[in-house]
Amino acid sequence: MRDLGITVPFTWEGRNGDSQMVAGGPQYPIWFTNLIYRGSLYTLTYKWPGLTEHPCSQIPGFDLGRLNQALRDARFVGREILQRSPARYVNHWRVGVVLPELPPGNHLRFPLALGDIYVDQKDRGTFWQVLQFGVQNLYDPALDEWLVMNTFEHRPGTVRLPPRCSPPPLTQDRAAHVAGARGR
């Protein structure tokens, strides 16, 4: 979070269509996780400067297939070299969400989200850097976030839904309430 003057470690793991990104941790000033888990997108922010509420938000119907569909619509920007140690030869892709979905021209449209993804030229399954901008970064003053990978391993990871994001156990009273709500 460059505009906050904070850099935190970042990991991203996936297994069987689920994925989990974790930024920061308990010892850092920022700690949050984003998950695609069993067909829903979850965001849970444990720590953020000035944030006192820590709910888990869920967007049902967002899975790996929807993410891949969005990435399939990405536009090729060009071949680039990320000047790090070591230098990374990447293909730069851009993906975005603009609403309302009207043709370009004299229509007022708003960019809701934008992602620049830097993918290894020799291995399109490896991305070395991501810049994302938009409403998905509500807590950041500039609505943006950089992700820079130092290493990348192609092996299954461990994806766990935090207990705070789990639905409460289904008691008999709650089961009757849920069944009644479905019947309406």
Image (cartoon, rainbow, N blue to C red):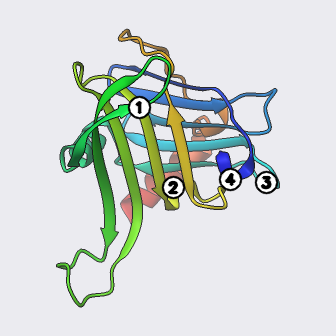
Using the image as rendered, state which of residue 179 and residue 25 is in the foreground: 25
Q: Which tag, 2 or 3, sits closer to the chain's start? A: 3
Q: Which tag, 3 or 4, sits closer to the chain's start? A: 4
x, y (%) of residue 171? 61, 38
* Label 1, label 2: how far apart the Cα atoms are: 25 Å
In the displayed structure, would residue 124 be above or below residue 48?
above
Disc number lying in front (2 or 4): 4
* Residue under the point 61% across and 61% down: 142
Local SS, label 3: loop
Residue of label 4: 3
- The image quarter in which residue 91 lies: top left
Q: Residue furthest bottom?
A: 106
* Label 2, label 4: how far apart the Cα atoms are: 16 Å
* Label 3, label 1: how far apart the Cα atoms are: 34 Å
In the displayed structure, would residue 172 be above or below residue 149?
below
Q: Amino acid at mark 1?
A: Leu
Residue of label 1: 82
Disc number lying in front (1 or 2): 1
Disc number lying in front (4 or 1): 1
Q: Amino acid at mark 2?
A: Gln
* Label 3, label 4: how far apart the Cα atoms are: 16 Å
Other residues around mark 2 within 10 Å, as few (<14) / some (14–19) / many (≥20): some
Q: Amino acid at mark 4?
A: Asp
Residue of label 2: 136
* Residue under the point 21% across and 79% down: 102
Residue of label 3: 51
Local SS, label 2: helix
